[in-house]
Image (spheres, rainbow, N blue to C red):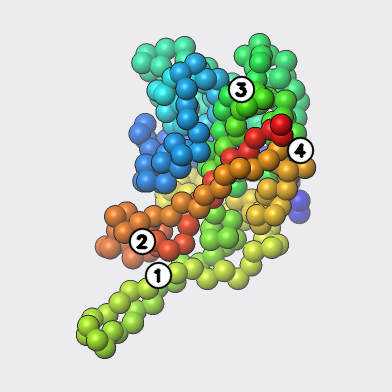
Amino acid sequence: MSALSFHQESIDSWDANAEFWDNGIGGQGNKYWKALQLPTLKRMFQVKPGSKALDLATGNGLAARWLASEGASVLATDGSEKMLERAKLRHSAVYGDSISYRHLDVTDIAMFEALERDPVAAGGFDIILINMAIMDIATLEPMAKSLPRLLKKDGVFVATLLHPVFWTSGATRNIEIIDDAQTRQSVVIRGKMIRKYLDVPPTRGVSLYGQPAPQVYFHRPMHELLSVFFREGLLMDAMEEPAFTEADSIPERVESHSNITQLPALLAFRLRKAA
């Protein structure tokens, strides 16, 4: 089955999980946001007061609120109507009219074309962000084709996602316990086993334990992921692979991903229009 055949299931799962996910992530974000995503975004671009930002797949509006707090005027969009409702519920008077909301399915080129004609996109965006959502999207072509027309000449597109090597490939977590003869103590070594990478079909998984419905993950090896954007003339000038540190570890939860400090949890990259 093609990835697109899972698209509606993906949207339905986010509608079903919207309230649970919003409650789990909260208004200030979880450890992944605070330890990995936000520090990476701050290195990827500087939000200047008056910047125009487009936040794709905004979820509960976490990144949109951060962009607005830094002085940007933000259009927050999502393909899930229920997630967009949660983002609006998180909106408070402190953001005033600095954030507006719009339903936008990034797999639908017609929605992007309608946005291009809208006055809100006039002159283009300084920042286009898609934070932790590419692995939830059935096809990236409509978004990639639209970016050159939506970005300002010196604008940036930044994406963060679960790392395709160490996460969406279906990698499994391994724990080894080795007795150290010198220290006479046991040593815990954590890693991941990767069995497939180049050809992994869409899979169902869990983002937050206890969520009402499984979500669909769309795996792409790096060359497929990035070539979609390169074909549209976009150039990559920054990439990072954020990983947890020992300060993030949870010793009492041996299964926690945050205990794996030598393998990146996320992939982040920045693209620009060709000069």
Q: Nearer the viewer, residue 214 or 36?
A: 36
- Disc 4 residue type? Glu
* Residues tagged 4 and 1 counted as in contact (Cβ below 8 A): no
The answer to which of 54 and 269 lies nearer the viewer is 269
Q: Earlier in the sequence, mark 1 or mark 3?
A: 3
Q: Quadrant of the C terminus?
A: top right
Q: Residues within 10 Å of mark 2 (few under 14, many from 20)?
A: many
Comparing 5 with 127, the one in front is 127
Q: Are marks 1 and 3 in contact (CB under 8 Å)?
A: no
Q: Secondary structure at mark 2?
A: helix
Is 46 positioned to the left or the right of 188 in the image?
A: right
Q: Quadrant of the N terminus?
A: bottom right
| Mark 4 → mark 3, Cα distance in angstroms | 17 Å
How far is mark 4 from mark 1, CA to CA? Answer: 39 Å
**The disc label shown at residue 190, or none:** 1
Numbered circle sitting on residue 232: 4
Left or right side of 75 for 35: left
Q: Residues within 10 Å of mark 4 (few under 14, many from 20)?
A: some
Which image quadrant is residue 221 in?
bottom right
Secondary structure under the numbered disc 4 in the rendered image: loop
- The amino acid pointed to by label 3 is Phe
At label 2, which amino acid type do we have? Asn
Query: Where residue 125 is drawn, which disc sits there?
Result: 3
Do callouts 2 and 1 mark residues in contact (Cβ within 8 Å)?
A: yes
- Relative depth, front residue between 139 and 9: 139
Is residue 19 visible in this depiction of the protein?
A: no
Which is nearer the N-term, disc 2 or disc 4?
A: 4
What mark, if any, has residue 259 been given in the picture?
A: 2
Residue extending farthest to the left is 184
Mark 2 and mark 3 lie on one chain; the one further toward the N terminus is: 3
